[in-house]
Image (cartoon, rainbow, N blue to C red):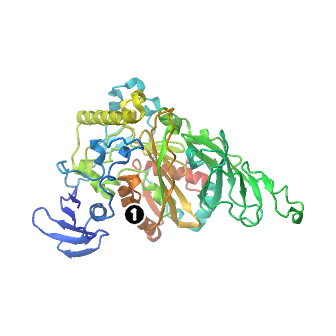
Amino acid sequence: MRREPHPFSGFVYSATGDARVRIEHPDNGKYGLFHWDGTWIEGDITHADPHFLRFIGGPDLAPEDDVIWTRLKTPEGDQTPPDGYMFGRMPEGIDRTVGRYDPAPGMHTEDGMRSAAHVELSYFLDNDRKPELVPEVYRKESPLKDGPQRISTERYFDPTYHAMEVEKIWRRTWQVACREDDIPNVGDYHVYTVADLSWLVVRVSETEIKAHQNACLHRGRILRERDGIKASEFRCPFHGWSWKLDGSVKDIVCEWDFAGVRQDVARLPGAKVGTWGGWVFINPDPDAGSLEDHLGEDMIAHYAKFDHSSFWKQAHVTRVVPANWKVAMEAFMEGWHVDATHPQLLLLNWENAADRYDVFGNWARAGHVTIGRGSAHRSLLIDREQLLAEYRMTADASRDYHRQIIGDEVDKFSDAELNDNSYCDLFPNFHPWAGFSRINFRFRPHGSDPDRALMDVIFISPWPKGKSKPPAAKQRMLREDQSWTEAEELGTLARIIDQDCANMVSVQAGMKTKYPRYVWCSSYQESKIRNFHRNYDRMMGLDEYRD
């Protein structure tokens, strides 16, 4: 049973084994009994931290699965190292850090206000033990200027905005459809859906992938409802019309009754296809620019040495979440929500208030060359010399662990790269985390309902180059009412996402009730969100866009 002190109050939360959590005051013996969903049952303590209740008494993982996602076992049985518990089950004997809340006024820098825990980028990079290996893009700083900024709430729930998004974003921009390894053989295909649009992404040859509109040109029936392998054609189950893998028409059943129609149905409408880092992107706009231009040179450079195309897909879990796709996505675009939403992380004196935020056009990164140790919001800061020591220690742990998997190739990486856990985002909806961090998120509108979204969690893991990769993990679909912990392949990330999703439904409801009809995004820590909305306004042709 879990039993932990709250990182701010010190009140002890204990799971009782019946979906209940007992909270005790550490000094006066007062207590409260709650259901893990926040319902008060009895006692003098009548209010509790909802996210800590969930962590202590909510849906859980088996101990062997309750490890950090970067240390999950590979098919060859790599062992989880001692720090594998870092964000999950904490063994006895590990010190818990508790401290009273401090509003943390921040500090002035040349680039504006930053957290009191801020340490300049150059300090870590200038003290890297392999400075010659640090990519130049790691030294680049590009904070978004201006702010705070108001964002209209209607765009999160108004059907008019949803309809505009379909026409102006999902039909006109580059978006991730699948991994190349999802369709390894000729004839393998993946059904990609976004809003009410559906595409067949098919491997036509060993070197070519195409994307076709997934609808019969006769009566509009969907050609394929699910992924498949080794197809030789796409035949409509309604009347039998069929198209070849390259999208050209094969058979028109009863063509004698469709005089003059062949030219119009000669080819399934297609989308542009591009690949990067092992990902397959599509863009339905025939006049779209190149995928490389959409990514930008800074993004391409940041990931270059890791070559994510050589990684294998370890996990893929999808769930409908009860919120607009933008609400869901924005939950993962800043780190300072950790204090309130993931309080268990603070027990290890881990905080994200000092994260760095950079924006580069369609791509943005955060948590770059940062170590989250120390807590500005509890006046528990760590001096820079100790931070550097811990920075090097985590780099060494990463190096030792990944040597088990990719051998001496790990020696080509600097401390900065081995520590790279940047949580990045690419407009409009793809979040490829950097380095060896493995996490990739994707967020899509679910059908025509602006209050529902599809959220994908995909792990890609390093694999020795030149060695055959394991088959790509199959997609697991969770029901909307299921906990992410039922996907044990996600490790401790599942429990963290459960906490994030607990916010989403209330944010979606709050967007509708809030008046005036706008929300605020901060100048720095929510600059990636502001950058998204600048790009969103530009694509949507909205007046809110400011160059």
The picture places residue 101, in percent across and down from the top left corner, at 23, 55
* Residue name at image x 43 percent, y 38 percent: 435
**Which one is in front, 392 or 224?**
224
* Residue name at image x 62 percent, y 59 percent: 166
Residue 171 seen in render: no
**Which one is in front, 289 or 238?**
238
Residue 308 seen in render: yes
The picture places residue 172, in percent across and down from the top left corner, at 65, 52
Tag 1 secondary structure: loop
The quadrant in which residue 52 appears is: bottom left
Left or right: residue 130 compared with residue 454: left
Could you tell me how many numbered marks the image carries? 1
Q: The residue under label 1 is which amino acid type?
A: Ser
As drawn, the residue found furthest toward the left would be: 28
As drawn, the residue found furthest toward the top would be: 132
Q: Is residue 71 above or below residue 265?
A: above
The quarter in which the N terminus is drawn is bottom left
**Which one is in front, 382 or 346?**
346
- How crowded pointer 1 is (Cα within 10 Å; few <14, some 14-19, many 20+) is rated as some
The picture places residue 201, in percent across and down from the top left corner, at 64, 50
The picture places residue 96, in percent across and down from the top left corner, at 19, 51
Q: Is residue 211 above or below residue 30?
A: above
Where is mark 1, residue-wise? 483
Left or right: residue 460 compared with residue 260: left
The quadrant in which residue 362 appears is: top right
* Residue name at image x 26 percent, y 51 percent: 346
Left or right: residue 18 compared with residue 406: left
